[in-house]
Image (tube, rainbow, N blue to C red):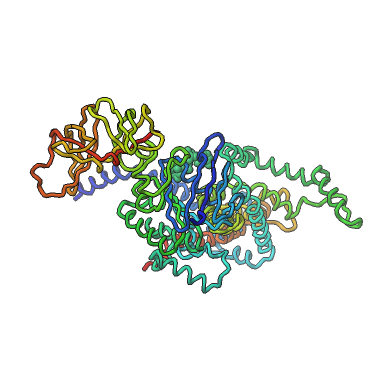
Amino acid sequence: MAAGRHSRLSEWFNRRGWSDIIISAPYIWLLLFFLLPFLIVIVIAMSVATRTPSAPPFGYGGDNPVLNFAGYARFFEDELYLRALVTSIINAFVAMILCLLIGYPMALGLTRMQSNWRNILLMLIILPFWTSFLLRVYAWMGMMGKSSWFNRLLTDIWNMVTPEGWAVSSIPMMHSNFAVVLVMVYTYLPFMILPLYANLERLDPTLDEAAMDLGTRPFGVFWDVTLPQSIPGIIAGGLLVFIPASGELVIPTLVGDAGSPMIGRVISDEFSSSRDWPMASSIAVALLLLMVVPTMIYSHFQTKAEHKPENRP
Amino acid sequence: MQDPFVRIEGVSKLFGAFQAVRDVNLTVGKGEIFALLGGSGCGKTTLLRMLAGFEEPSAGRIFLDGQDMTGVPPWERPVHMMFQSYALFPHMSVEKNVAYGLKHERMTKAEREERVRAMLDLVQLTQFAHRKPHQISGGQRQRVALARALARQPKLLLLDEPLAALDKKLREQTQFELMSIQERTGVTFIVVTHDQEEAMTLADRIAVMDKGQVRQSGTPTDIYEYPNSRFVAGFIGSITSFDGRVTAVEGEVSRVDVPGLGTEIVARSVAGAASGQAVTVALRPEKVTLTRDRLEGPNAIAGEIKDIAYFGKDSLYRVTLPSGQLIAVHGVNAKRAEAGRPDWHDKVWLSFDPAAAILLTE
Ligand SMILES: Nc1ncnc2c1ncn2[C@@H]1O[C@H](COP(=O)(O)OP(=O)(O)OP(=O)(O)O)[C@@H](O)[C@H]1O
Ligand SMILES: [Mg+2]
């Protein structure tokens, strides 16, 4: 009995053990560096803020109930947080739509290009990642500033095309949601282009010819054949832009309007300035659920639609 | 004779410096099934794509029903193509695929539905109307592609290797289906194939292509019985060929001296064959009679049987000639267990009619 169990154990270890470890590596990674920290954040979210110096600024017990939902309650009651959330979602959504409008033609153009040119252009799309992200944001700050050549050029154009009374000395671009969206579009555009390109590149060009052959003009072919088949790419690119953009901290801090902060800024402030860790954690958890749940619902229906046999007789 | 329905006039196509199609002249009659036959890379698909409007000819013109097609884009041509890969829209159901071309027709919803139903009926796919292309078999996909191409009632249907993706049994069955559908719809078909049997079965007329050129066009009988070149004779069916020299032209027949054969060959004369000219005589296996004793007649060659392939209803003999050359001879096994049936290493006589010997000058 004992021997049998031992041999079976060693057999399991020899035959399956290593492959199991290798397969489970990403899950272990996810567990250690995402789920566990997230669990800690959930726990902190339900504690109470304390003001003891030289100790973690949260605690349990005493007159604090173990489970404290005050942070969540405040998140949904205090207008400040909801406004920040709405600002974030709107900014991220606008950035996503602009990325799609700019990125789709670029991705489509790439697929129709000769392959030697295509590789150069793909390189150029990835190239900005090789310079510091902060440096690029500072560059935009310089560009948008009141005395920059860019601002003066736009000011001159504005003054030329508008009536006398509308003249301005400079265009106020910095510290606005416009600036935030502009820099986010610039930053996240590759995340839209690359999945779209991967999707469009796989499409069969003879389908376009078949549609043309059946009487459809080129624009109609795009609408009937290319676009419906690229929806998975649009969704992947959209999520890759929308999710990080909605939680973006650096861009709104540097170029955004301090009067209408985005949610990432609020979380950061709660942690560092107010030192209200439970509040900050509550917002973080709420935000994560708001992002993850729709994604999961979408992918659930996506896989279901893919496997659904249509009216099998 | 009525005007040809499709007229291809001196059409060439260059891809850079490479000439894919070279000065092709063809006519196709209304309601015909016309086959373009040729080996891989000979320009069949390119010619078809020029008919559909996906490529412009580098030179020459294409007329359809008397109308010059130069500069007419694919979406305005009354020509539909059935692609080699079928090119069904993967995101649409079978029904939507078939209905797709009708989108641009001026017809009511009811008429459209009626047409789609009729098309699905024609290809016997009504019960699969709501499936996606990836949920049906290869043969069914082929029929969807056909229904989709026929739905708009084109004047001309181009089929690029329509049966290549099907297995042998399904292919034979589908050949007859295609022919019956063509008969019922009356649409002119141009079918590309590299399978000579398929071309012979399907087509009213065949054009044999090689390296971008049309080598011969005509009815299957013309091409089989009267090939105009060694290439065509060798491409369609099997032949044994003898290189020789014309010694005399005597009206109906020409005498050809073939070195090492031990006798001269008498073949039906062709235009352009003159005394002293180097020619090739081609013989098809079924045109040669194999006997133990010498038959009366002009062409009789002695030989020895090298091997026999027995197929039941018939046999294929390979016979060694005095020159050492092998010739294939086809024999029908009309009688059962014939006592005198030729056997391995038997000395035999081969004879054939002068009219059966194909004289080729090019
Ligand atoms: N777009 C193109 N650019 C350059 N060369 C081409 C192009 N299309 C075809 N060719 C060349 O033209 C020749 C004829 O091609 P085509 O596709 O017409 O052959 P095919 O007869 O249909 O052959 P297969 O039976 O293999 O389909 C080939 O050598 C091919 O490489
Ligand atoms: Mg081809």
Task: Please state if B317 lies on the left or on the right of A144 as rendered.
Answer: left
Nearer the observer, B111 or B236: B236
Q: Position of residue A298 (x, y in %)?
A: 51, 61
Q: Could one spot residue A63 in this view of the protein?
A: no
Q: Could one spot residue B294 in this view of the protein?
A: yes
**Up/down of B19 relative to B66, above or below:** above
Residue drawn at (24%, 47%) of the image: A8
Q: Residue furthest top?
A: B260
Q: Position of residue A212 (x, y in %)?
A: 56, 55
Quarter the C terminus of chain B occupies = top left
**Up/down of B309 relative to A86, above or below:** above
Nearer the observer, A17 or B336: B336
Task: Please state if A193 lies on the left or on the right of B281 as rendered.
Answer: right
Nearer the observer, A23 or B58: B58
Task: Please state if B235 lies on the left or on the right of B316 as rendered.
Answer: right
Q: Residue furthest bottom?
A: B110
The part of the image, by quadrant, that contains residue A11 is top left
The part of the image, by quadrant, that contains residue B76 is bottom right
Q: Residue furthest left?
A: B339
Nearer the observer, A100 or B309: B309
Q: Residue furthest front?
A: B251
**Up/down of A199 relative to B343, above or below:** below
Give the tally of numbered discs: 0
